[in-house]
């Protein structure tokens, strides 16, 4: 299953990502949106493991992308 941008809803892999800074900013906004939506759906108690794993993956991907953007080479 994919979202409206064609991104898989589960798992985010940035290993071979090569995009411009504008693309980075777009992907960062998308990841932030997906994280916010997931957090809004999380129950206050006894959150399902799958949701927690997905949240961890999204947050890790966001961290990696922000790190890439912070380097001199940007997201290339």
Image: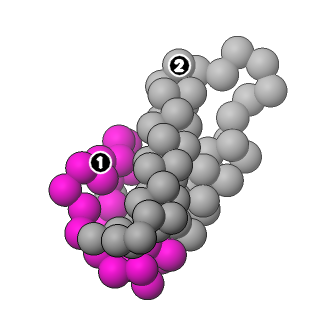
Furthest-right residue in this view: 44
Residue 3 location, quadrant: bottom left
Query: Which dot, 1 or 2, sits closer to the camera?
Result: 1
* The one of 51 and 19 positioned closer to us in this rendering: 19
Furthest-front residue in this view: 72
Q: Name the residue that disc number 1 marks.
A: 13
Percent of width and height locating residue 44? 80, 26
Which sits earlier in the primary sequence, circle 1 or circle 2? 1
Q: Is residue 4 left or right of residue 59?
A: left
- Range shown magenta: 5-27
Count neighbours of disc 1 (C-alpha within 10 A) and say few if under 14, some if 14 to 19, many if 20 or more: few
Furthest-bottom residue in this view: 22
Q: Is residue 47 left or right of residue 14?
A: right
* The one of 73 and 20 positioned closer to us in this rendering: 73
Residue at 52%, 33% in the rendered image: 56
Q: Secondary structure at mark 2?
A: helix
Residue 68 location, quadrant: bottom left
Count neighbours of disc 2 (C-alpha within 10 A) and say few if under 14, some if 14 to 19, many if 20 or more: few
Q: Is residue 16 magenta?
A: yes
Q: Are marks 1 and 2 in contact (CB under 8 Å)?
A: no
Furthest-top residue in this view: 46
Residue 49, numbered circle: 2
Secondary structure mostly seen in magenta is: loop
């Amino acid at each position: 299953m994919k979202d409206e941008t064609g991104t898989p809803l589960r798992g985010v892999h940035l290993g071979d990502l090569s995009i411009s800074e504008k693309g980075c900013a777009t992907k960062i906004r998308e990841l932030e949106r997906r994280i916010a939506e997931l957090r809004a759906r999380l129950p206050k108690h006894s959150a399902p493991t799958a949701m927690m794993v997905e949240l961890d993956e999204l947050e890790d991907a966001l961290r990696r992308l922000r790190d890439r953007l912070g380097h001199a080479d940007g997201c290339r």
